[in-house]
Every structure is written in C-alpha cells, then in structure tokens.
Image (cartoon, rainbow, N blue to C red):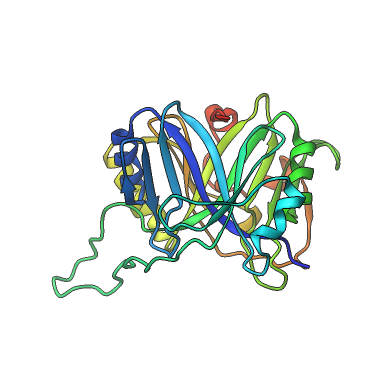
Amino acid sequence: MPGIISSIAYVRLGAPDLDVQEKFLTEFGLVKVHRDARRLYMRGIADEPFIHVTELGESGVLAVGYNVHPDVPIESLQERFGATVEAIDEPGGGKRLRLKDPNGQSVELVQGRERVAPLPRRNLLRGTDGMSKDRGPAKIERLVHTAYATTRLHETLDWYQSHFGFLATDELYIEKPGNTLGRFVRADMGDEPVYHHILFVFRGDKDGLHHCSFEVERVDEIFTGGDHLHELNYDHVRGIGRHALGSQIFDYWMSPFNVMHEHWSSSERMNDKSRFNEIQIGSGMVHDSGERPPERFVKQASPILS
Ligand SMILES: [Fe+2]
C-alpha cells in the first residue's frame, strides 16, 4: 500500500513586509497569483494553483502543505489524525486537514485543489538576431522539499514516516551507524518514480526550517536565475554545487526575512524499491561539488510560528 502523500504542495511563511517579499520571490522565479492586504500567493510554471504563501506578520514558517494521494479520500484520514476536514478559502480551493508535528510545526494535508494551466517554458529556439540572451528570473516548476533542524530527531522522523508512509532514502551518521545526524525521506508512490526526498530532518541546536527547495525547469535555470539574483545583490548563501546524494544541483539564497530558498535540479529518481543507504558524514560526502558550506548555512533555522 503506497503512502498517503503524493507530493509537497506549498510552504506558508510569515513576513513583515509583503512588498519586499513579493519583489524577492518574483526575482527568485515565482509568479504572483493573488495578493491582498495580508496574504501573498505565488506559483511556479507547473499546474499547482500556488506553491508559496506569505502571511503578513512575524518572519518564519507557519506551515507546510502536502498533497494527499488521489486514491486516499481525505475524509478517511479524519479519525486517524483526530482532525476535521475543512474547505480551503484560498486560490484553487479544495479541502484541508491541519495537524501539528512533534516540533509544533503546522502541517496541512490538502486534496482537490484545482489545477491551473501551465505557464510558458523557456524558449529554447535561438531567434533570427542570433544571440543566446535569455536573462531574468529562473523558471521554477514546483516546490520539491523542505529541510528542518530539530532537537527531536527520531521523534520527528518517526512521526512523518508513520503518519504519511514516507520512506527512508539516505541517512547520514557520525562515526558509527545509528548515531544519526539526519535522514532524507521520500513519498511512497509504489513503482512510480519520486524525488530523492520530500523532507530532510537533521539534528540541530534548535527547531526550525533550514530551507525550502524549488525545482527549476532545467539545470541552466540555476545559473540564469543565480546571475539574475547576483545582479540585484540578493543575499547568496551557498552554491552553485552538487550533492552527491541524489545527484542534486543546488544554489541557496536567503530571503530578506531570513528564510533560505533553494534553486534545485536532480536527475535521480527513486521508487519504493530503491536501496536505503547509510552514509558516514565526511567520507560519504566527499563527492559534494562546490565550496564548503559556510557556518551560517549549517546553523540556519527559521523560527516555527505556531
Ligand atoms: Fe534542499
């Protein structure tokens, strides 16, 4: 029986200035869907009605949304999770169940959101003027994962794996197996290929969102979009590089409100039979390409706003 979650739907953040947030997110590569006095909704070029919400207020993370597998009626989860299905009064509509994870992080399970028409992709045909000159923000397809620092590593992993059926993809340990530093978990869609992880949870000094990650249309977009953000003097944290685990090309940018956003692309996929690996931190990571991560990358944890 595959898990009950098919993919990640959106992040819901808090920020004290929606103008500044909208400008950053637009230059990062997201597209505005709706904005009112208190909320800002952004989408990618794929068909999700929105993948990023900002609510006016304190800076941090309010919730993460996950799509319930279409074969699992969301109503059937009410008793199991002790929560009541409610209608979503946001772009795309649909239904939602709200839960709290062991760190107090709100988790929103959603189903029945209306799909929207995809937006134009990058034009790959060179024009008659004869120059390759596409510039501007990255073309972002979708949200693919979040990463969390936690003081309750095993409790958090057990919660997500037992509640949603997430499968362990890779685990990092210090010195000996079982001394876990962090674990990447993925959605269980049976034979269907999924991304390396939908969630990365690692041991930290405090609880918080490390980053949210957005898949770009193709790897070129990480460079195009990065050039664009550099030209505008946005706050670059780490990249461009490649994690050996999951063949993940990355570039990390800090929002003006101290929430890290990743441009991401990967050519590797998993299904429910893919092998689980335990990797000693250090030796197993020597294939990470790019510069060593700065201290602030390692320590990053945006507050959980409950
Ligand atoms: Fe990531």
Q: How many marks?
A: 0
**Which image quarter is the N terminus in?**
bottom right
**Which image quarter is the C terminus in?**
top right
| Residue at 35% from the left image edge and 51% from the top image edge | 29
Q: Position of residue 179 (x, y in %)?
A: 83, 36
Q: Is residue 203 left or right of residue 221?
A: right
| Residue at 86% from the left image edge and 39% from the top image edge | 176
Q: Is residue 84 left or right of residue 52?
A: right
Q: Is residue 240 left or right of residue 4?
A: left
Q: Is residue 303 left or right of residue 129?
A: right
Q: Nearer the viewer, residue 46 or 214?
A: 46
Question: From this viewpoint, is residue 292 visible?
Answer: no
State whether residue 40 is above or below residue 49. Answer: above
For this orientation, the residue located farthest to the left is 129
Q: Nearer the viewer, residue 223 or 192?
A: 192
State whether residue 283 is above or below residue 149. Answer: below
Question: From this viewpoint, is residue 201 visible?
Answer: yes
| Residue at 45% from the left image edge and 30% from the top image edge | 258
Q: Position of residue 111 (x, y in %)?
A: 57, 60
Q: Position of residue 131 (x, y in %)?
A: 20, 66
Q: Position of residue 151 (x, y in %)?
A: 72, 28
State whether residue 121 is above or below residue 227. Answer: below
